Amino acid sequence: MEQTVDSNIPDWGPFGKPLFDDPEARALSRVGVVDVGSNSVRMVIFDGAARSPAYFYNEKVMCELGAGLSETGRLNPRGRDRALKALRRFQYLADDLGLPGLHVVATAAVREAEDGPDFCAEVKAETGLTISVINGAEEARLSAQGVLLGWPGAYGLICDIGGSSMELAEIGEGEVGLRVTSPLGPLKLRDIKGGRRARKAHIKQTMEELRDRLGPQRDRLFLVGGSWRAFARLDMLRRGYPLNVLHEYRMTTKQVRETIKFIEKNDPDKLRSQAGVSNSRMSLIPYAMDVLARLIRTFKPKDIAISSYGIREGLLYEQMPQALRDRDPLIEASRFSEAKDARLPGFGRHLYDFVMPLFRSAPPARVRLIKAACLLHDVSWRAHPDYRAEVCFDNVTRANLGGLKHSERVFIGLALQHRYRNKREGNRFTPLYELLDEKDQKQAEILGKAMRFGAMLWMQSDAPMGKLKFYPKKRELELFLPAATEPLFNEVAESRLNSLANALKSETRVIMQR
């Protein structure tokens, strides 16, 4: 959803007004949050476009504060010491970077441990940081809000697994619904006596109680948390998946079951090394996968998506006004990149107007990808000319962009690659093209070649650049050029127009407007 543009602001057409021109958005440009979890303590500093911020700084320390909690009732002493040292460092970094403060939350381990209040007091005395200890329902809400930051229109069930707890929350229509918490964190499951049989019986009983409270949940299942991300890496390894990006990675329930069998049959150390999973995280996988197996069996989701966004992003989302939340994170991030890195900021919306006659029947989901590509078409210009096509493909397929399926990343990347190069065969990205069917590959090629040609007609960001008309049934492509642009239509531009026409399997007609 895009905001109505104020009448005093020049018309931005389909793009609306840039958020980063708004003082309210700029106030969110750099925010530091710390999540004191049962397994890890992490600080993230967000920066950039407020609706789709970049990770300016991201550091994690594996402390295992919740290890042994179910037996002793207290925080792990070694973990407590490590967490205090990590928080000292984080506060020092925040001061050094000039942050106004850090937003610190603690979850299951600190809220359940008898020495949790003492730990918070020690942190306050040593660092000046105030830790907000949140309950399970609040943890679930913040995790769900983190998912909404990346997927504004998301609906389904959020499952956030930490070290000592697992939270579930419903989302739909931009709102968080029912929320529940449970003691199904791997660190707690590890302490259950009686081996795997007893553990699985406990998981089953707890999951049935959660289902009774939440009711049927047959929509998408969003997985949040380090253990789920580690599992997804192992799923990628088993499948030989070509794009190593965890956010928006999709799995089916069948694939989850196959990966569980794959993990059980193979040497954990070998899998850990091949998938790039840490020792500490790999040690928790057996417990997490038992939870996941029962979760999908109980709720039967239609599909499963990994979210790299969780509590920390939820804290950022908490500070956003509704008008900011309603914006499309992909478009805002793309526009911010254009404003920061393009040679002619603002040209992207004119390029969008120029190419859109080729995509008159495109559905809204495709239109937003075309918008993003046009905004990003020139942000890699500083790269060496021989590598620009590769750099822009690499950047967009691996960038921190919200609201993008993997196939959509490849679509934009392929379009930008064709913005700089006619052919795409014979490079290291070929395996990634398989995430698109042939029709979508062709559409990305057409978009890229249209942008490649449109960039040749560039004079000023607000200058007329000509118009395209496309007649699909007659296979005719017409170009209308204002007289002022005639000197720009040289043999190179004509060659690019012909390349676009060949992709469209059309004949061309150039009409000079006197």
Image (tube, grey):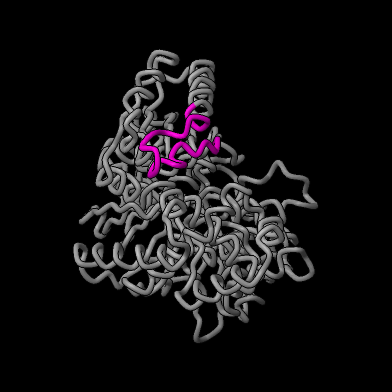
- Whether residue 64 is in magenta: the answer is yes
Indicate whether 238 appears above or below 354: below
Residue found 37% across the figure and 74% down from its top:
297
Corner quadrant of residue 432: bottom right
Of residues 2 and 125, the one drawn nearer to the viewer in this rendering:
125
Residue found 29% across the figure and 62% down from its top:
206
Location of residue 413 in the rendering, given as x and y in whole percent from the top left corner: 61, 60
Provide the residue span drawn in magenta. Answer: 60-80
Can residue 330 be seen from the camera position used here? no
Residue found 47% across the figure and 59% down from its top:
288
- Whether residue 432 is in magenta: the answer is no
Residue found 41% across the figure and 72% down from its top:
303
Location of residue 159 in the rendering, given as x and y in whole percent from the top left corner: 36, 57
Location of residue 257 in the rendering, given as x and y in whole percent from the top left corner: 50, 75
Indicate whether 253 appears above or below 42: below
Question: Is residue 206 found left or right of 344 in the rendered image?
Answer: left
Question: Is residue 322 found left or right of 460 in the rendered image?
Answer: left
